[in-house]
Amino acid sequence: MSEGRQDGDDDADAPPPPAPPPAPGEQGADSNFPGPRTLYYLTLLAVLAGVLAGFTGGAFRWVLVKTDAARADLAQWALDHGPWGWLVTVLVSTAAAAAATWIGTRWPMSAGSGIQQVEAVERGEDRAAPASTIPARFIGGVLSIGVGGLVLGREGPTVHMGASFGALAGRLGRATRDEIRVLQSCLSGAGLAVAFNAPIGGAIFVFEEISHKIRLRYLVWTIAAVVAAISCSRVVLGNHPDFTVRAITEPAVANLPIFVVFGVFLGVLAVGYNVVIARLLSGLRSIRRIPAVAKGAAIGAVVGGGLVYVPDAVSGGDTVAQSMLDGRQLAFWTVAIYLVLRFFSGPLSYAAGTPGGLFAPMLALGTLCGVFFARVVEAAGVTVDTDTRITLMIAGMSGLFAASVRAPFTGIVLVMEMCAITTVSISMLATAGAAVIVAAALRSAPIYDTLREQMLAVEAARRTRSGDG
């Protein structure tokens, strides 16, 4: 008996049992020496799926640009034609939201963001989305985000369309179930990259938010898919950052406490934002006597009214964020009102059950938070120069996302790529770090975890009612 060995530990020094053999086609999939199937064949499938996701996502964004412009023209026309013009805008938004909600009920996997469904598949809690999700997401997203002007993000549909293309490529290529799971996860990053022209952020999203791990096949397939998707989307959209930001310098180290306090503010706000999203979504679902399409139409009517008289409080928010970054001046109470309106209009739009995401509206909300906080700091007697004010807006975008989603590096890199700026990284890290700490201390679950649990509960109840469970 060896020294230190106790009675009853006869197997203490025995070697561990051998690992089970890999599934067919999986030999070396996550080792340092992957087999040719992982390196070549499945990487080729990821590239082909990336091409499809890139062109489709690029086309989706192009259509949204056109419908956004048409919607703005309609709102201007409504202002020139009094109450009747306003009524036309309300009717258009109502009809678009109702149609998008019907698509979300007819193809349930197309409702909401889609990111939570991708995560559920990665965890083995759901099946990969069928190919029908792709046109449902495309058409429903155009109706809800573009025509209807709901406060939703384009990244939800593009992420889910990318994941669906990954799963489709795996099925057609006779991949194993596990390979299909990984392909759909990798292609979700390609979809996010296309949504914001942010290839590195899209890749990090796969590892930090979807898989929560790094394996060789995840790396290889994600890189291949993102490169293919971004290259194809730029053929459609061109290559330019989503936001134009003038050259700025990193605020002085002495100003870092301002960003830490700002992060605390964002962390508290993100916790409240997550609560409002979850409760509005579950609350509207619990009202079963009113059809889902009618609820979606009512939300569309509310948003349609806002499109004419308070356009900065509705729609995706890119225009609002860019105008603030350009130096647009608003009165303090105007900023505060827009902040409150967007805090609730985003969750309300999401509760409609139409295709659309959460991140893009957070960008506008985070930007307004930066403007608001800069005014508060100035009121406290601290001088805030232009560079610090812009940095607060940029840090607000990434910090709010970091606290809500609990994916700080994804948020920071995405915003850096969207703004084509790297000179304010320390301020962004300080803000995001403080925001995440506060959200975690308040025991707020990441928003996509909450949405995934709600989605699975709804699906389980549906199966029980239909006798499938």
Image (cartoon, rainbow, N blue to C red):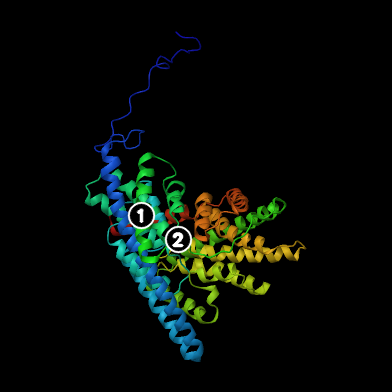
Picture residue at 40% right of the left edge, 75% below the top = 67
> 243 or 173: nearer the eye?
243
- Residue furthest toward the top? 1
- Which of the marked residues, 2 or 1, is nearer the chain's N terminus? 2
Amino acid on which disc 2 is placed: Phe
Q: Which mark is residue 460?
A: 1
In the figure, residue 370 lies in which quadrant? bottom right
The percent coordinates of residue 278 (x first, y second) are 49, 60
Look at 32% across and 48% down and name the residue there: 183
**Do we see residue 83 in this rendering?**
yes
Q: Which residue is mark 2?
A: 196
The circle drawn on residue 204 is none
Q: Nearer the viewer, residue 281 or 254?
A: 254
Position of 195 with respect to 243 (left or right) is left
Percent of width and height locating residue 281: 46, 64
- On screen, residue 154 above or below 126: below
Q: Position of residue 390 (x, y in %)?
A: 62, 63
Q: Nearer the viewer, mark 2 or mark 1?
A: 2
Residue 291 visible in the picture: no
Mark 1 residue type = Ala
Q: Residue furthest front?
A: 247
Residue visible at 48% across and 91% down? Answer: 81
Measured from the top left, where is residue 79 in percent x and y? 51, 87
Nearest the eye: 210 or 220: 220
